[in-house]
Image (cartoon, rainbow, N blue to C red):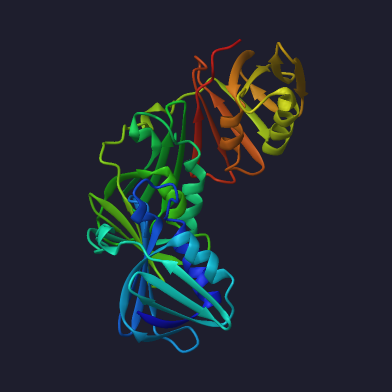
C-alpha cells in the first residue's frame, strides 16, 4: 500500500470511525482500523463486534492519491494520534509488518496488526429500506436512551426497541423502573413494518451529530444499517423479544400536577444539595397549596424546598422519587409540563406540549 492523503481531512474520518471502536476490547484485532486501498478508492472499517462502520473515500486531488493498492490492520488510537499531528498532504506506505508515515521532515513507524485475525463483517444492504430524517431520529433516540439499563442481566433492558408500522416509528426504552417513549412520523407509501431492538450504547453512536438530512435505513432480522455520505454504520440487533411495555401506561388518572419545568428542576437542585452520587431519593409532599421537596440524610442533615407556583388537582399525597430519573425525564421537555398520577400512585406519567409525541413513566420508590 502506498498513498498520499490530506492529514486534516483524514483525521476527521478516523475520529468518526473511532466511535465504533472499544479500546478495552479483549479481542485485540477489533482495536484496529482495517484499511483497504483499491485502484480508485480506500475503505476504512472500525468495529467493536456489535457496532461497525465502513467509510469509502474516493481518489481525489488534494485529498487522496493512490500509488499502490494494499490492505493493512493498524492500531486505531495510535494512527489517529499521529495523523492529528501532521499538516497538509502526508505519505503512507507499508513494508512487511510496518506502516511508514512521512509528513514533511517528520517520520513515524507503526507496527501493524495481524490482518488475518480481523473478523469478516457483512455490510450487505438487505431487508426493509426506509428513508428517515437523521436529526429527528437522533433526537428521538436521545429522548429515550437514558431510560435503558447498562448492566441488567436481562439483556432486553439494556436496549431500545424500535417499532415501525403505519408510517410511525416508536422508540421505547426501560430499565423496569421507568419507561421512555417517543414517536416519529415517517412518510413512506409502502405498507412495511418491523420491530427490532438494539443496545442503547450502540444507538447512541448510530446517528452522528453532523448528519441532519435524510438518510437511508436498512433493517432485517439480524442488523440495522444507516447509509449516508459513502458511509455505512451497522448495529447488530438484540436476539430476544422485547417485552410489550406500552400497556404499562395508565389510561386514567386521578391527580394532575401542572408546573414549569425550570421551576421544578431548580427546586430539585436546591433539595439535593446534601445528596451524593449514590443517594438519589427525594420525598415529595403535594397538596392544593404547595409542594414540599424533602431530602433526608441522617448522617449529614436534611433539606426542605417549597414550591407554591403550580396548579394541582386531586387529593393530597406523599411519594418518594429517584430524582435522577425525574430530571432525565423532564430534560426532553421545555416550558410547562403535566405530571399525571394514577389512583394507586404506583406510577406517574410526564407529558408536555413542547414534545407532544413523547411521554415518560416513572415508578416511585418506597417511602422512607
Q: Residue at x 49, y 30 (%)?
A: 361
Work out whether 114 lies above or below 151.
below
Which of 2/62 is in front? 2
Residue extending furthest toward the bottom: 61
Which of 271/112 is in front? 112
Q: Quadrant of residue 291?
A: top right
How many numbered discs, if any?
0
* Image x and y of residue 86, in percent: 57, 75
* Image x and y of residue 139, in percent: 51, 52
Q: Residue at x 50, y 20 (%)?
A: 342
Work out whether 48 lies above or below 111.
above
Q: Residue at x 30, y 42 (%)?
A: 238
Task: Report if residue 196 is visible in the image.
Answer: yes
Q: Quadrant of residue 156?
A: top left
The quarter of the rendered structure image containing the C terminus is top right
* Image x and y of residue 203, in percent: 42, 49
The quarter of the rendered structure image containing the N terminus is bottom left
Work out whether 353 lies above or below 51.
above
Which of 1/253 is in front? 1
* Image x and y of residue 16, in percent: 48, 63
Q: Is residue 193 shown left or right of residue 227?
A: left
Q: Residue at x 70, y 15 (%)?
A: 296
Work out whether 347 lies above or below 143.
above
Task: Report if residue 211 is visible in the image.
Answer: no
Amino acid at each position: 500500500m502506498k498513498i498520499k492523503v490530506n492529514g486534516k481531512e483524514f483525521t476527521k474520518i478516523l475520529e468518526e470511525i473511532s466511535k465504533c471502536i472499544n479500546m478495552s476490547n479483549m479481542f485485540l484485532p477489533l482495536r484496529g482500523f482495517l484499511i483497504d486501498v483499491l485502484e480508485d478508492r480506500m475503505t476504512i472499517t472500525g468495529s467493536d463486534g456489535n457496532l461497525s462502520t465502513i467509510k469509502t473515500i474516493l481518489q481525489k486531488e488534494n485529498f487522496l492519491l493512490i500509488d499502490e493498492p494494499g490492505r493493512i490492520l493498524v492500531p486505531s488510537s495510535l494512527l489517529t494520534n499521529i495523523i492529528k499531528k501532521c499538516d497538509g498532504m502526508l505519505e503512507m506506505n507499508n513494508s512487511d509488518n510496518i506502516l511508514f508515515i512521512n509528513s514533511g521532515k517528520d517520520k513515524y513507524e507503526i507496527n501493524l496488526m495481524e490482518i488475518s485475525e480481523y473478523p469478516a463483517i457483512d455490510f450487505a444492504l438487505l431487508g426493509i429500506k426506509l428513508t428517515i430524517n437523521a436529526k429527528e431520529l437522533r433526537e428521538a433516540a436521545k429522548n429515550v436512551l437514558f431510560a435503558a439499563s447498562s448492566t441488567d442481566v436481562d439483556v432486553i433492558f439494556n436496549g431500545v426497541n424500535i417499532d415501525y408500522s403505519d408510517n410511525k416509528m416508536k422508540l421505547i426504552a426501560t430499565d423496569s423502573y421507568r419507561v421512555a417513549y417517543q414517536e416519529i412520523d415517517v412518510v413512506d407509501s409502502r405498507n412495511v413494518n418491523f420491530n427490532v431492538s438494539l443496545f442503547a450504547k450502540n444507538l447512541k453512536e448510530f446517528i452522528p451529530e453532523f448528519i441532519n438530512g435524510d438518510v437511508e435505513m436498512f433493517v432485517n432480522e439480524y442488523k440495522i444499517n444507516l447509509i449516508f455520505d459513502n458511509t455505512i454504520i451497522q448495529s447488530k440487533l438484540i436476539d430476544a423479544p422485547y417485552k410489550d411495555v406500552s400497556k404499562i401506561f395508565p389510561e386514567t388518572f386521578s391527580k394532575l400536577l401542572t408546573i414549569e419545568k425550570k421551576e421544578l428542576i431548580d427546586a430539585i437542585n436546591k433539595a439535593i444539595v446534601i445528596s451524593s452520587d449514590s443517594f438519589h431519593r427525594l420525598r415529595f409532599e403535594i397538596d392544593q397549596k404547595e409542594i414540599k421537596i424533602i431530602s433526608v440524610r441522617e448522617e449529614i442533615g436534611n433539606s426542605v424546598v417549597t414550591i407554591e407556583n403550580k396548579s394541582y388537582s386531586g387529593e393530597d399525597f406523599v411519594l418518594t422519587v429517584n430524582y435522577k430519573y425525574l430530571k432525565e425525564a423532564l430534560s426532553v421537555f421545555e416550558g410547562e409540563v403535566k405530571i399525571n398520577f394514577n389512583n394507586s400512585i404506583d406510577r406517574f406519567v410526564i407529558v408536555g406540549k413542547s414534545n407532544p409525541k413523547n411521554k415518560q413513566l416513572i415508578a416511585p420508590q418506597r417511602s422512607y
